[in-house]
Image (cartoon, rainbow, N blue to C red):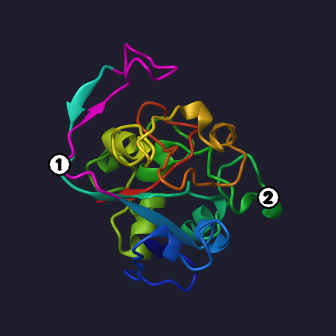
Amino acid sequence: MVVDISDTSSPNSQKYYPDVSFLPGGILSNHDFRTTKIVMRKIMAKDVVWTMGSTTFETQRLSAREATHPVSLENNYYIGVFEVTQLQWGLVQTGRVAPSYYKNQEDRAMRPVESVCYNEIRTGAANVTTGNPAYDWPADPNPASFLGLLRKKTGIDFDLPSETQWEFAARAGNGATKWGNGACFEVETVPGFRAIVGQRSEATTRHPTATILRVFDWFAQQGLNSSLVFA
């Protein structure tokens, strides 16, 4: 699904494509998909029972915080293929410069918004550690926040992904931490991953048969690239 957020866009005008190969101009070659449009991937998670948490064969695991347990989601959902870029942030926030490392126009357009906190995204309180609890999930976000303005602009109930939605999508969109050919992957082998952790590369997708996502979550409330989700 592709959502137009350009200055001439209108609510509820998203377009659906049967496969990434149908995207006009190619997902990486067409820069609109990281500037004036948001590309969402449908994650088929409904009623899939999978193991959440970190298994012993996964490197850099924190066993005290990542105990394995079976879970399932009640619905399928869409999640952003790319991180939210600085140009996209400015289109939603009416020209406001994104809180990011890169500030000049030449470099920042397709780079992720990496220096933003939960409160600024959802509750509308910028650069603070506590926001307005009236807008905390599961309540609707503050209409003046990034998510509130994005909802108004598109007519779509965008939100930040839950921990479970994030992990299912990060595990190749199948909850199993396997590529499309069934092979297990290690984070360190994912093309472009280290660059994204460095937070200064262009927003990028990962692998043709799976998706690794760096998204904002509750545990680390600052400094991560943010992604979007809606059910």
Check disc 1 and give the amino acid type: Asp
Please state which of the two labelled residues, at mark 1 or mark 2, is closer to the viewer. Answer: 1
Q: Reply yes or no: does residue 57 show up in magenta.
A: yes
Q: In this view, does 194 lie above or below 104?
A: above
Residue 107, labelled with which disc? 2
Q: In this view, does 172 lie above or below 76?
A: above
Q: Where is residue 78 in the image (x, y as percent from the top left)?
A: 36, 60
Q: Is residue 145 visible?
A: no
- Tell me what residue is drawn at x 79 percent, y 64 percent: 105
Quarter where residue 218 is shown: top left
Asked which secondary structure carries label 2, the reply is helix
Marks 1/2 in contact by CB < 8 Å: the verdict is no
Task: Identify the image quadrant of the N terminus.
Answer: bottom left
Task: Identify the image quadrant of the C terminus.
Answer: bottom left
Please tell me which residue lies in front, 13 or 185: 185
Q: In the rendered structure, which segment of residues is drawn in magenta?
A: 43-66
Check disc 2 and give the amino acid type: Asp
Please tell me which residue lies in front, 56 or 2: 56
Q: Where is residue 35 in the image (x, y as percent from the top left)?
A: 63, 69
Q: Reply yes or no: does residue 168 show up in magenta.
A: no
Residue annotated with mark 1: 47
Q: Is residue 229 above or below residue 168?
A: below
Q: Crowding at label 1, few (<14), some or many (≥20) Cα neighbours within 10 Å?
A: few
